[in-house]
Amino acid sequence: MSAAIEKLQEIIDTHDNIVFFGGAGVSTESGIPDFRSQDGLYNQKYDFPPETILSHTFFMQRPAEFYRFYQDKMLCDTALPNAAHLKLAELEAAGKLKAVVTQNIDNLHQMAGSKAVYELHGSVHRNYCMKCGRFYGFAHMKAASGVPKCECGGIIKPDVVLYEEGLDNTTIRESVNAISKAQVLIIGGTSLAVYPAASLIDYFQGEYLVVINMAPTPRDRYADLMIQEPIGKVFSQIVVR
């Protein structure tokens, strides 16, 4: 165990109000591609760039093309929680971790057993008819061909925050409340490049800011502990006491 991991273990051992703020890097070890790495979705070739396809305007104007990309690249039904997801759930069960604030939409934290999960960008497991509001689950969207339609004829839209759309106010409020009260904030697997989500960490006023990420982030210089290793590898070494 490295000195940095030993320090993280010490911080976790001596605090019981920890909040985890995570991004795409938490799920890459589960086989879900991130957006900004060399092999991420932003660096793959499509007729339109992913940030254009995943916008509200594009969804409304070209739903068939939106869903071709969405079903191909965003609906991963083979991914399972990795060591990071599992350890965070274990820390919550032990009363150490108070909340997970995630930018991911893959439901892996819940699959691992986490209860207090604030999904800033929504979830691919929730989908609603834009006309009547009827709910549809992940399996329905995965099996659909073309533009998914409700029985009433309306288009079914994923409950995910597209570009040009605002974050859910209740989720923001709950996330800010958790972060502002935390003794320890662990930032993991995120470049902190997506706003307004990344700005929520400004509310942290606690004792230890921990950053675990393979690439540099804008908050590294403020971190009390910085670890540049895969997050699953890091958490697999942590013991919950």
Image (cartoon, rainbow, N blue to C red):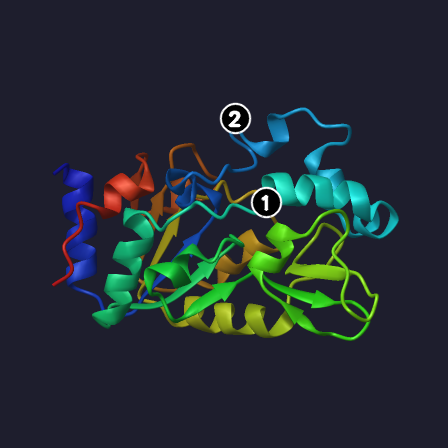
How far separated are the C-alphas under marks 1 and 2? 15 Å
Q: Residue at 38%, 33% (x, y): give it.
A: 214
Q: Which residue is mark 1?
A: 74
Q: Please state if 1 lies on the left or on the right of 32 as rendered.
A: left
Q: Quadrant location of the N terminus? A: top left
Residue 183 location (% of width, % of height): 31, 66
Query: Which mark identifies residue 39?
Result: 2
Which image quarter: residue 225? top left
Q: Is residue 105 above or below residue 15?
A: above
Front one among 13 and 160: 160
Front one among 204 and 91: 91
Tag 1 near tag 2, CB within 8 Å: no
Q: Quadrant location of the C terminus? A: bottom left
Front one among 83 and 191: 83
Q: Is residue 76 above or below residue 100?
A: above
Secondary-structure class at tag 2: loop
Q: Residue at 62%, 59% (x, y): give it.
A: 140
Which image quarter: residue 36? top right
Q: Residue at 62%, 51% (x, y): give it.
A: 143
Residue 47 location (% of width, % of height): 77, 28
Residue 237 location (% of width, % of height): 17, 45
Q: Is residue 64 visible?
A: yes
Query: Which mark identifies residue 151?
Result: none
Q: Please state if 158 lies on the left or on the right of 183 as rendered.
A: right
Q: Residues within 10 Å of mark 1 (few under 14, many from 20)?
A: some
Secondary-structure class at tag 1: loop
